[in-house]
């Protein structure tokens, strides 16, 4: 029983490290949000499995995923086509995990193993819901069909590792996964940045946020745009998992939580802006931070996120919260309060896990020196890779500060 639980733990852990690479590659924000939610729920499953497993002899003391399991997931992330990726994960790997949970219930004694079975019953409910939630987003084609067959063969090798195999080539051996240089936003318009001082250019006007004369309704729309743009954090934080495969599970657990939080923050904007009458197809999505950070080492990406961007955002956001409170919009106040609370946790995660990520990636200097060097490297990388995404829309077509003002007053 302990060995079955161990295998389930490793499958969930491998899912977390691999499914995260889909996030920047799928275009539809709704699919990104779902992936983040499923990754977070998988982290919960893995944590409870490990907790229960440790009560049983034979579960093992390490957090490591055995190579025979990981190579199937390493294979699953090799396609570049988002539809093939989703078909492989939700048509083959997730059903395998669900089947493994069902097998657990069949194989264990209802009374002797009652505590684990209760957990597994819960997880089966989650897995069935994940399948339902993703189902409408999947597209079948001859290509995705062939890819799923390939992955099924890879999975079959997991159950019979010594079986003789003919005509099977592991793609990830010759062409391992590499992060895309930019992230996919599907049909949505894109740009480099949504921040400027020019109300005719961008939706967020920095001076207006600080100016006490700015109408609070303008501030509310601007902070929703800002929150929606946290989709960039979703895309670049997703890239850190696969680069830190040997990290303690607790680190990936907290990063999965961090990722899910950012996807919720982005949804705060994505869901509220249309309710306030703004058309999402007129709001360009900024790719700047992903494009720059992806050129930097994973540990620097995480260091800048937690020690620079998140730490530096509190003062401005506190002022914005005060202004939004004038509107007696309880929902807006609630969303901003949760955002603030989550961000405080993220900074805490940064303090806890940055030294570990540095270790994983072979950086030996002090954290302080490392963060200083990361900031300098960011400035250099921004010169080379920044400001390279042209506006999808003309100033007449896109949402700008001026148009927000006109819309709310
Ligand atoms: Fe956030
Ligand atoms: Fe955050």
Image (tube, rainbow, N blue to C red):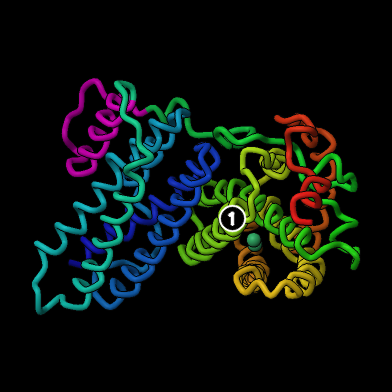
Is residue 155 magenta-colored?
yes
Q: Is mark 1 within 8 Å of ligand 1?
A: no
Q: Nearer the viewer, residue 203 or 185?
A: 203
Split into 4 quadrants, where in the image is the N terminus? Answer: bottom left
Q: Position of residue 69 (x, y in %)?
A: 32, 46
The residue at the point 87 percent across, 57 percent down is 208
Q: Confirm whether residue 377 shows in the render.
A: no
Examine the rendered structure and indicate whether residue 258 appears above or below residue 30.
Answer: below
Q: Which residue corresponds to mark 1?
A: 275
Q: In the picture, residue 323 is in which quadrant?
A: bottom right
Q: How crowded is mark 1: few (under 14 residues within 10 Å), some or many (20 or more)?
A: few
Which region shows up in magenta?
Answer: 144-170
Write the residue at 28% across / 26% down.
Answer: 145
The residue that appears at 44% across and 60% down in the rendered structure is 40
Q: What SS does tag 1 mark? A: helix
Quadrant location, the C terminus? bottom right
Question: x and y percent of residue 201 in the render?
Answer: 84, 39
Q: 257 left or right of 323?
A: left
The picture places residue 166, in percent across and down from the top left corner, at: 21, 22
Query: In the figure, is residue 239 to the left or right of 45?
Result: right
Residue at 75% x, 50% y: name it: 407
Asked if 280 appears above or below 177 in the picture, the reply is below
Q: Is residue 248 left or right of residue 317?
A: left
Who is closer to the viewer here, 243 or 24? 24
Residue 184, image quadrant: top right
Q: Is residue 7 magenta?
A: no
Quadrant field for ligand 2? bottom right
Give the vertical position of 193 relative to 369 (above or below). above
Q: Can the viewer see residue 99?
A: yes
């Amino acid at each position: 029983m302990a060995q079955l639980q161990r295998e389930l733990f490793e499958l969930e852990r491998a899912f977390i490290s691999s499914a995260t690479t889909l996030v920047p590659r799928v275009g539809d924000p709704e699919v990104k949000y779902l992936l983040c939610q499923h990754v977070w729920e998988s982290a919960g499953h893995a944590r409870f499995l490990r907790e229960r497993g440790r009560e049983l002899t034979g579960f093992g003391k390490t957090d490591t995923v055995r190579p025979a399991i990981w190579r199937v997931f390493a294979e699953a992330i090799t396609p570049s086509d988002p539809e093939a990726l989703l078909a492989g994960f939700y048509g083959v790997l997730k059903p395998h995990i669900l089947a493994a949970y069902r097998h657990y219930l069949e194989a264990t004694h209802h009374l002797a193993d009652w505590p684990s079975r209760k957990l597994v019953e819960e997880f089966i409910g989650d897995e069935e819901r994940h399948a339902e939630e993703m189902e409408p987003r999947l597209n079948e084609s001859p290509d995705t069909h062939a890819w799923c067959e390939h992955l099924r063969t890879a999975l079959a090798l997991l159950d019979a590792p010594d079986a003789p195999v003919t005509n099977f080539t592991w793609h990830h051996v010759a062409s391992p996964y590499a992060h895309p240089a930019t992230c996919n936003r599907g049909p949505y318009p894109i740009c480099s940045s949504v921040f400027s001082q020019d109300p005719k250019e961008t939706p967020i006007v920095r001076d207006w946020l600080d100016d006490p004369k700015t109408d609070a309704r303008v501030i509310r729309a601007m902070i929703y745009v800002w929150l929606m743009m946290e989709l960039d954090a979703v895309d670049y934080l997703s890239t850190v998992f696969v680069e830190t495969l040997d990290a303690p599970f607790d680190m990936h657990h907290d990063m999965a939580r961090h990722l899910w939080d950012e996807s919720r923050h982005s949804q705060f904007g994505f869901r509220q802006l249309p309710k306030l009458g703004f058309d999402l197809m007129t709001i360009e999505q900024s790719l700047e931070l992903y494009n720059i950070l992806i050129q930097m080492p994973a540990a620097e990406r995480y260091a800048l996120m937690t020690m620079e961007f998140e730490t530096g955002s509190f003062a401005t956001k506190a002022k914005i919260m005060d202004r939004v409170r004038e509107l007696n919009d309880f929902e807006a106040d609630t969303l901003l309060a949760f955002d603030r609370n989550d961000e405080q946790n993220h900074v805490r995660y940064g303090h806890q896990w940055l030294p570990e990520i540095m270790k994983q990636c072979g950086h030996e200097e002090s954290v302080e020196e490392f963060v200083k060097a990361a900031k300098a490297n960011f400035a250099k990388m921004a010169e080379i890779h920044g400001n390279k995404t042209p506006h999808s829309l003309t100033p007449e077509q896109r949402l700008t500060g001026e148009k927000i003002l006109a819309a709310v007053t």
